[in-house]
Amino acid sequence: MGYEPQADFGTPAVTAQTRVSLLIDGRAISVPTGTTVMRAAALAGGSIPKLCATDTLKQFGSCRLCLVEIDGMRGTPASCTTLASEGMVVHTQTSRLEKLRRGVMELYISDHPLDCLTCSANNDCELQDTAAQVGLRDVRYGYQGDNHLGAAPDQSNPYFDFDPSKCIVCSRCVRACDEVQGTFALTIAGRGFESKVSAGVASDDFFSSECVSCGACVAACPTATLNEKAVTAIGKPERAVITTCAYCGVGCTFRAEMRGEQVVRMVPWKDGKANRGHSCVKGRFAWGYARHQDRITTPMIRNAITEPWREVSWDEAISFAASEFKRIAAQHGNNALGGIVSSRCTNEEGFLVQKLVRAGFGTNNVDTCARVCHSPTGYGLKNTFGTSAGTQDFDSVEACDVMLVIGANPTDGHPVFASRMKRRLRQGAKLIVIDPRRTDIVRSPHIEADYHLALRPGTNVAVLTALAHVIVTEGLVDEAFVRDRCDQDEFRDWAEFVADARHSPEFLAPVIGVAAQDLRGAARLFATGGNGAIYYGLGVTEHSQGSSTVMAIANLAMATGNIGRRGVGVNPLRGQNNVQGACDMGSFPHELSGYRHVSDPAARALFEAEWGVPIDPEPGLRIPNMLDAATDGLFKGIYIQGEDILQSDPDTRHVAAGLAAMECVIVQDLFLNETANYAHVFLPGSTFLEKSGTFTNAERRIQMVRKVMEPLNGFEDWQVTQALARAMGLDWNYTHAREIMDEIARLTPTFAGVSFARLDAEGSLQWPVNAAFPDGAPIMHVDGFVRGKGKFVVTDYVPTDERTGPRYPLLLTTGRILSQYNVGAQTRRTENARWHLEDVLEIHPSDAENRGLRDGDWVRLASRAGETTLRAQITDRVAPGVVYTTFHHPTTQANVVTTDNSDWATNCPEYKVTAVQVTPSNGPSQWQLDYDAQSDAARRITATAAE
Amino acid sequence: MSGVDTTAKLVRMINQIVRNLLHDKDPVGAVAGHVHAFWSPRMVQQLRAHGSDGLDPVAIAALERLGQDHGHAAG
Ligand code: SF4
Ligand code: SF4
Ligand code: SF4
Ligand code: FES
């Protein structure tokens, strides 16, 4: 496929019930009312020259290049700001217009360097194209007058340059930053000839400004002023392939623009329904890890973790792994084996890993890293609504009137969706934030939360019960909704429970640490403010009452009638790209794909018929249970695809002990991760750029991942799993990932209508896709709940066992930041590292002062599980008594400190609450020193060439 | 070795389940149902072998009910 830039219709699409018909250059066209003449002309197949307009931004009307003539109208109106009307007759090409346009263009070009031939954007530049389009050949004024040609470029951003000498001051970048991204980092400083784009700080460079490096301005710039460094370094792309970001659960789609086997740039795809042409710094720029020198592309084995690695052929590695697993099964039984499915891998890869475990290892000991993030979502929403998934699509936010954001930090964790939330908030939607920390969405340009309930970590259920108390006792329940849609007895029990005086804001305020009147105000606003939508993240699930909190959220949505239409709903913001998919694919030890319990004989029979083996009707072990069984000497071998449990899971010492107690640990990954320090077999993995498959985002949207280059390790990850399965005696013969999806569709009722062919044709599908919903379901529970009647569940607040006391007086909560992703294995290996060189501990000024700490000091962070050291950052973002850190760097070892407490229903770890003490320190802890030494030793590779 | 007492952990887990299901109409049934749905048989066996020490009475009753209703004892 040759290279074509994305089509640009000049101004955004409008949706309207009515249409108007007009004639453009003799061609008849009908468009929705409210469409501009420019867009109508583009839809009719024509093209009007333009510079300041682009279809991702509101029309601006500054360049005067898009002039047209309209019968009966005086002068030459700008087509980008003139709306099409019924019967209009438009002329876009007349000699008068040509002359006018050439004159305008001449002014632009006279102040522009004429180095097109050597410019990185040559042949990919709107200014150049437009000059050609208007037939400009020469500049009458010459190039000697005042100009900006000597202005110095700003190369401070690691991914793109700003060369002001090429700027035509169209302000597309400024508008993109405001309208699309919502960061308001750029301004046009000065006036007239002096005007220039500015990142608005004293040093005036991009890196030190408010810029979050989302790339929206780069995508909007019609010249080479804002241009990717990679385009300069590699050259213009030659082909483009649509694929899906492998970082977070927003699921942005991109055009991977390629030159040969090299990615030149990732350009957000305008037709992508999750991102609508926007992106964040990770998906847009942080893909360089795919070719990082640390990548391991040759398989390795060793007999003991004290030995160095030995590079071997694929055959040797696979047969070593298979013979070890067969030996363990023979000696210790099938239940001594297990596997972990990664939420970063594709649906097809996840499905195959759980199939290998159930059908090949003969056990249900399979789990996914969703265990440590969203397993409570699955439990809570299935119980209350009947499906383990969010209820809305992202577009739904456009109709939301009150957003309740609880335990989520969307501007860092889900940045592209956060931009859409912020746009809606700037349009006037109200905002309630429930979070112990003052996250960025609480206060940002043109946005101020109506309520920020800065609760004590661990009191989510108490807060939600207090809100429910107000709604029930003040008569704010949506009676009609509850009567029609929910079980009445359960509702009455619940209403009686929350109405009890001991659940009033006044009674609970001291527990929660938030004033009663704020709790009352927030409840009233949510119940009476129009369409109320709840967005939540890991600050809800990663608690000892994670599942209860999810159910309390569902209760609140049902009580206020906020389910089953646009603008409302319960929306879990998923962490990793394919958390939803990994859960859907049957990666939990108790469930087959499509959330059917292993004890269900009908579901088992389907799989047994397709796979030709019996399925164990009893649940298997979850990740923490596997580790416990390992330390008890009962669990001996694990196959881990794409996960780094040593860094990501809580209580690192216990994870290390569990892994060390196993006889064969197989790690399949891109890099020698921390878990691989305890592995006996290392199988190199492939990146999302090197394989085919699908990811399912937080809106249940299934999207294609397309191979844009050959895997550096030689195989897609599903092929490696297939090789292992064959070596274990299973007769698998998939030749392409699409065949795995066909099997998923045969076995999973909610995926019955999904195939690669349909995804190719339609771009994406939101499950369920089956006879009842042939084209998928953007919004769920429209005509009734999947489980029948909505179920209110009484959720009593049970304080966590993790309490502060004299030894550990502070509460630690954890989270993440924009530029880094999860354990950082990928993002640390890109320039994104420059935004976050190390994990720091946020501590309130008063707590810091009590301990004699200054900003930047080394501190010792200790809990009953362990201790680590890191630097302190003094800030009032956190409340007194609360400290906060991230877990992106292995050297910090934040999870040495987190405990084995977990959610009562799912064992999802309680990352968000750990009682700690913080004291001054002068260097790394003994554990960090020991760990570094062990880690260096475990990573040794003997230099034997593989075949 | 991490020195983790995994049996003590199971005791803690089931007591935690009890505390969160106490408002159910039939707490014993709810706890038994939950354990049956999410715990591997080996975890149940390990807890049974440990006896009733430290277990909430509802948990003890649930483990008994589990044996009768689900044949989990043999698991
Ligand atoms: S990269 Fe994004 S945040 Fe930075 S200036 Fe451009 S639009 Fe604004
Ligand atoms: S940097 Fe690009 S988008 Fe911004 S004003 Fe200059 S030419 Fe326009
Ligand atoms: S990390 Fe998330 S928000 Fe950023 S580009 Fe990827 S999918 Fe989109
Ligand atoms: S494109 Fe219409 S005025 Fe610039």
Image (cartoon, rainbow, N blue to C red):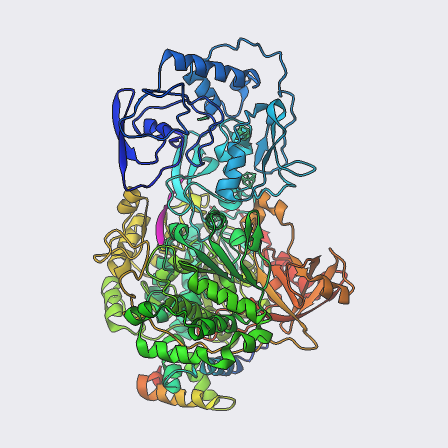
Q: Is residue A155 left or right of residue A355?
A: right
Q: Nearer the viewer, residue A765 or A578?
A: A765
Please tell me which residue is depicted at 34% across the width and 62% down the height of the picture.
Answer: A355
Q: Quadrant of ligand 4?
A: top left
Q: Please state the horizontal and vertical placement of residue A286, each as a whole percent of the image.
A: 53, 43
Q: Please state the horizontal and vertical placement of residue A442, each as a whole percent of the image.
A: 56, 55
Which stretch is magenta?
A701-709
Q: Residue furthest right?
A: A852
Please tell me which residue is depicted at 46% across the width and 70% down the height of the picture.
Answer: A549
| Quadrant of the drawing holding the N terminus of chain A | top left
Q: Please state the horizontal and vertical placement of residue A305, each as a whole percent of the image.
A: 56, 62
Tell me if I can see residue A214 in this picture: yes
Residue A508 part of the magenta segment: no
Residue A707 part of the magenta segment: yes
Q: How many marks?
A: 0
Q: Nearer the viewer, residue A660 or A278?
A: A278
Q: Is residue A206 above or below residue A883?
A: above
Please tell me which residue is depicted at 47% across the width and 10% down the height of the picture.
Answer: A137
Please tell me which residue is depicted at 35% across the width and 39% down the height of the picture.
Answer: A14
Q: Nearer the viewer, residue A659 or A94?
A: A94
- Residue A901 picture quarter: bottom right
Q: Please state the horizontal and vertical placement of residue A87, each as a whole percent of the image.
A: 26, 27
Tell me if I can see residue A727 in this picture: no
Q: Nearer the viewer, residue A198 or A586?
A: A198
